[in-house]
Image (cartoon, rainbow, N blue to C red):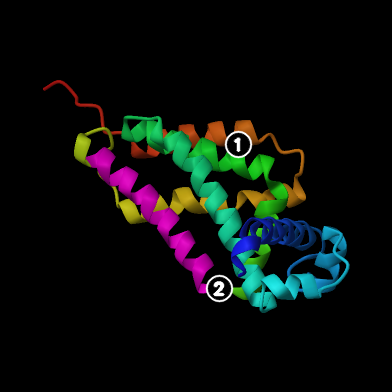
Amino acid sequence: MPPGRSVTSRARRAQIVEAAIAVIAEVGYAKASFSRIADHAGLSSTRLISYHFRSRSELMEAVLTDVIERIGREVGEGVGLEETAAGRLSAYILSVVGFIDHQRASMVALAEVMLGAGFEEGIEADLSATEGVEAILLHGQRSGEFGRFDTRVMATTVQRSLDGLPFLLRSEPDLDCARYAAELVTLFELATAAPTQANP
């Protein structure tokens, strides 16, 4: 990349990735051609895409990276404000559902690319998300906030309840996501709570 064009190049790459997300969300992974993406971005030629991305696979990887990094930033901000494990788990659920609700095209594109291409990057990011939830659960057990349960099973259950939301929104676009999040928070508060100590 020429030194004098770094800022321009980053801006163009971001423009292309944004257009790719929109096109994938609209027509699906399989039909998201360079031609469609160039048209959506208002580019005169697909060569402008090829200049920044050597292949379709490289562009799809950039789509995954973009969406996952944005989720990570938003969720990290919410979780970072909480001091307790219970607060962190609730913040995680609320932040992820909020992102899914307000970034629906991005989430559809993420799901389409992961299902259509199965990149290792996407799989690793998904596992790291589960590991992040498991770390919260382990902290809660060690601090006595949470009861005894298999943290891997619980973390996977939490994550899958969130991963399924974009697909649910396809069939129910008017779904009340705030209520959905609140129900999940209550569900996992009950599922993770430490047992009440009975008086002898």
State the mark number for residue 119: 2
Residue located beneath label 1 in the image: 180
Instruction: Please tell me which residue lies in front, 44 or 4.
Output: 4
Q: Which residues fall within the magenta stretch?
A: 119-141
Instruction: Provide the secondary structure element on which disc 2 rests.
Output: loop
What's the mark number on residue 2?
none
The amino acid marked with disc number 2 is Phe
When the figure is inspected, residue 162 is found, relative to residue 115, above or below; the finding is: above
> Which secondary structure type mostly characterizes the magenta part of the structure?
helix
Among the 4 quarters of the image, the one containing residue 22: bottom right
Up-down relation of residue 181 to residue 131 (above or below): above
Please say if 88 is above or below 127: above
Mark pair 1, 2: CA separation: 29 Å
**Disc 1 versus disc 2: nearer the observer:** 2
- Identify the residue at horizontal 38%, vertical 39% (top origin): 191
Q: In this view of the protein, can residue 162 be seen by the observer?
A: no
Which residue is at a point 47% across and 32% down the rendered structure image? 186
**Residue 37 point in image, percent of width and height:** 81, 65
